[in-house]
Amino acid sequence: MANANDLLKNVSATVPEKVGDMFKVGFVIDCKFLVGKSAEAIFGHKWKFALESPVFERMFCGAFIEANNSTEVALPDDDPKIFRILRRLLYNFREADVTSLSFEDTSNLCIMADKYMVETVVKLCCGHLFTFKERKKQIKLFALARKLQDKFLLYKIELIISDLNPIEHLWDLLEKKFVSTL
């Protein structure tokens, strides 16, 4: 006979699959995000986004139009692919993993999470970004830290570059060259 812990394990293992199925058909969903220039429909629950993000909380519970029982939320400046990743992390954060993401996707996710003030995802992304050791990616990471005004990221980048020789330490030149590619 299975004990209570085994039953809970099995239930929690099926929840993400059930939530995924709900997203596909829009079942018991109270919010449709229209993401990107093409307004791709991405389903979600207002309560979950409000719980995880102060920005969505103000959007759904404050004086914004979305708080007035609107089921559609237009997010034309966001990338649908990155928004789906953010949604997946919000719904399944205990098992959140970004290690399979590319540097670019992780950077974009970090920027989006910062925009919506989802600190847990920002920290998760930052941890993964420091695993990329290529010089060009470290320079892009420096630009990202400057863009986000993240003192912790900037401090860690300074630790990395303190080991470089003086020629490689010319961040102003490198920043001008690579910041625009972020």
Image (cartoon, helix red, strand yellow):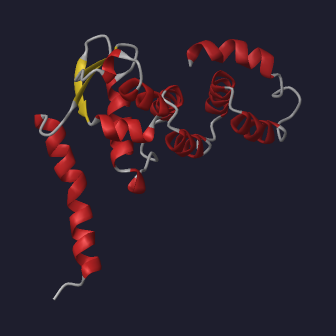
| Figure check: 157 above or below 55 | below
Q: Residue at x 24, y 84 (%)?
A: 3
Q: Is residue 45 left or right of residue 142?
A: left
Q: Residue at x 54, y 30 (%)?
A: 114
Q: Where residue 75 appears, x then y in whole percent?
A: 35, 17
Q: Quadrant of residue 87?
A: top left
- Mark yes or no: residue 35 visible: no
* Residue at the right extreme of this rendering: 166
Quadrant holding the N terminus: bottom left
Q: Quadrant of residue 56?
A: top left
- Mark yes or no: residue 5 visible: yes
Residue toward you, 83 or 43:
43
Q: Quadrant of residue 172?
A: top right
Q: Where residue 78 appears, x then y in whole percent?
A: 39, 19
Q: Residue at x 39, y 17 (%)?
A: 64
Quadrant holding the C terminus: top right
Q: Is residue 152 left or right of residue 39?
A: right
Q: Is residue 105 left or right of residue 179?
A: left
Q: Where residue 63 appears, x then y in whole percent?
A: 41, 18
* Residue at the bottom extreme of this rendering: 1
Q: Is residue 155 left or right of residue 118?
A: right
Residue toward you, 163 or 156:
156
Q: How many marks?
A: 0
| Figure check: 113 above or below 2 | above
Residue toward you, 145 or 182:
145
Q: Residue at x 79, y 36 (%)?
A: 158
Q: Where residue 89 appears, x then y in whole percent?
A: 38, 44
